[in-house]
Structures are given as C-alpha cells and as structure tokens.
C-alpha cells in the first residue's frame, strides 16, 4: 500500500499522523503535484499571464480551458485583512489604481480594473479575493499553488487566514503553499502539516532537498536557471518534486519535460501543453 503523502521517505520532519492523507487514493497521490514517474504537470503562472490579465478570474478560466493541471497565484492582505490575489505590493503595474494594496479595503480594491496590458479586451477584470478563487476552484479538478507575498510586508495572521480558507473549501489535498519567506512556510507547516509547502528560491542552494526537509517543506520551486539536469536528477532520487518558474521558451519547456521535471510554472500553459503532447 502506498504510504501517506507526508510519510514518504523524504519528509523527515512530519511527526503527526494524517488521517486525511491515508484516505487518499493512489490516483490522487500520484496526481498530486507531479510526483513519481508521471508526466510533467503544467501550472499556469498567475493564471495564464502570457495571454490574459495576470491573477484574475479570466486568466484562471483560461488555464482551465486549455487543460492546465494547475494554477499559481500570489496573495497579499487588504486593509481590512482579507487575502486578495495580486502580485505586487502596489497597484500601479496591473491595475488602474495607485498606492499600496494594504491601504485599501476589499470593497475599494474591487473598484479598480485589473486588466493591465490586456485592458482593451478584458476591462471587466478585477482583483479577486482568495476566497472567490477557492470557491471557484473547488468546482474544478485543478491544483493550486498559493504563493504568499509576505517577503516585504509581514502581514501578521496571513498564514492563519489562508489556511482557514483552504479548510473551508476542503482543498487541502490540492494546495501547495510557497513563499520566498521561509519563516512563513514553517508557520504554515506548523498550522497544518498535511498541506504541502514548497521553498521558492533564486540561487544555487546546495542540496536544497535537505534544507527543504529541515523546514518541513516538500517541493522545490526554483528559478529556471537553477533547474539544471543534475539538480533534477538528484531531486528525483530524493523523491523531491521540482517545479521551476517561469518557463516560457520552447527549448526550456522541452528540456524540463525531457529532464523529468515534476511540473513547470509557465505564463503560456497552452503552448506548454502542446509541446508536452508533441513529446509524448
Ligand atoms: O511561484 C513562482 C513565481 O510566481 C515566483 O515569482 O515573482 O512571479 O511571483 P513571482
Ligand atoms: Mg508568484
């Protein structure tokens, strides 16, 4: 019988029993987050950032429609403490608003257009709350990588709020938490160890699977140049999923699929899926 997810040989820090995990089917276990020998999963970065307004429902719907297995999105907290889906701390780049996300209530944030450079086509796009996104996601089969954008602003209680929402929609088995703030990953792991955490990193950490395990994390979400063949091979031997970002060029997509990357995070899920099919 397959071991529960969190008890597999490479997750040394998980001490708690996990009844939910032990109820998972093998299919769920294998589908989860690109482990084992299965094909490289395609995760749509900020929805489908390359073709639709990033981190908006229209981008998430596009990811679903083209057949991506998962979505990655970014979360901040509004002035009234609600987790909202947007990449930057500030509004200027992706919306017609000005200033800091943290200085507006959700009601105020909802008044901005979030269509950025796709404005002509998608004027209706707004900043989603995480809750709206999870409610929708629950009706799909998609995996979701929630990136906590708490590297610059600490957002006290952000982790508790996000875990509570994931529980509310019973999405624990389809979520990966990631962050460049690894203190936050430790907190998330302590709050709910059965939800996978993954370290985000940009540089050539030595044997990052060992470090990840030491903080209760499972996945390696590395900057594309770090995802060299040796790292992919060693991580695979360690049973550690690698999901590089942001993989947009055909040659890189091809190389990572052929190199056995567990998943790739891409702005162009449709293109990545075509390439994957062509290699099958
Ligand atoms: O989670 C992968 C990737 O999104 C991390 O960088 O800046 O695009 O959020 P960023
Ligand atoms: Mg991100």
Image (tube, helix red, strand yellow):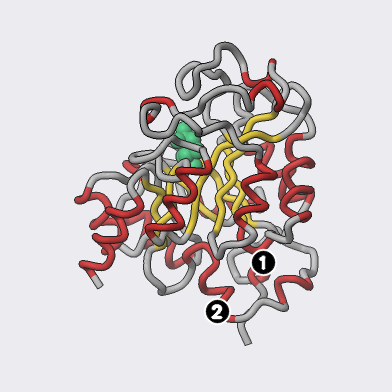
Q: Tell me the element at label 1.
A: helix
Q: Nearer the viewer, residue 141 or 5?
A: 141
Q: Which residue is mark 1?
A: 6
Quadrant of image for the C terminus: bottom left
Residue 127 percent coordinates (x, y): 58, 32
Can residue 15 be seen by looking at this rendering?
yes
Of callouts 2 and 1, the N-terminal one: 1
Q: Tell me the element at label 2.
A: helix
Can residue 201 be seen by looking at this rendering?
no
Crowding at mark 1 (Cα within 10 Å: few <14, some 14-19, many 20+): many
Residue visible at 21% across and 50% down in the picture: 250
Residue 117 percent coordinates (x, y): 37, 26
Residue visible at 62% across and 71% down in the picture: 8
Crowding at mark 2 (Cα within 10 Å: few <14, some 14-19, many 20+): few
Q: Which residue is mark 2?
A: 27
Q: Nearer the viewer, residue 56 or 219?
A: 56
Does the residue tagged 2 have its C-beta within 8 Å of any atom of ligand 1? no
- Position of 37 relative to 76 (above/below): below
Left or right: where does residue 202 sit relative to residue 280?
right
Q: Nearer the viewer, residue 225 or 210?
A: 225
Can you name the residue that lies furthest to the top here?
99
Give me the disc on residue 76.
none
Q: Quadrant of residue 279?
A: bottom left
Residue visible at 79% across and 69% down in the picture: 17
């Amino acid at each position: 019988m397959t071991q529960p997810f969190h008890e597999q040989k490479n997750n040394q820090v998980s001490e708690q029993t996990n009844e939910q995990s032990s109820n998972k089917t093998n299919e769920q276990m294998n589908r989860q987050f690109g482990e084992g020998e299965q094909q490289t999963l395609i995760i749509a970065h900020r929805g489908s950032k390359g073709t639709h307004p990033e981190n908006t429902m229209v981008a998430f719907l596009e990811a679903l429609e083209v057949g991506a297995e998962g979505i990655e999105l970014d979360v901040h907290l509004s002035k009234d403490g609600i987790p909202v889906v947007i990449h930057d701390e500030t509004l200027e780049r992706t919306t017609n608003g000005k200033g800091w996300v943290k200085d507006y209530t959700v009601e105020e944030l909802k008044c901005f257009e979030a269509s950025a450079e796709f404005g002509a086509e998608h004027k209706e796009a707004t900043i989603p709350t995480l809750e709206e996104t999870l409610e929708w996601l629950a009706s799909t089969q998609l995996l979701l990588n929630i990136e906590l954008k708490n590297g610059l602003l600490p957002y006290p209680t952000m982790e508790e709020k996000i875990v509570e929402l994931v529980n509310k929609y019973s999405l624990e088995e389809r979520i990966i938490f990631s962050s460049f703030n690894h203190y936050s990953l430790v907190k998330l792991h302590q709050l709910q160890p059965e939800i996978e955490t993954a370290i985000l990193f940009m540089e050539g950490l030595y044997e990052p699977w060992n470090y990840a395990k030491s903080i209760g994390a499972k996945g390696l979400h590395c900057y594309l140049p770090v995802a060299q063949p040796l790292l992919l091979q060693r991580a695979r031997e360690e049973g550690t999923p690698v999901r590089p970002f942001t993989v947009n060029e055909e040659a890189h997509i091809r190389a990572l699929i052929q190199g056995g990357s567990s998943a790739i995070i891409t702005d162009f899920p449709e293109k990545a899926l075509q390439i994957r099919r062509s290699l099958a």
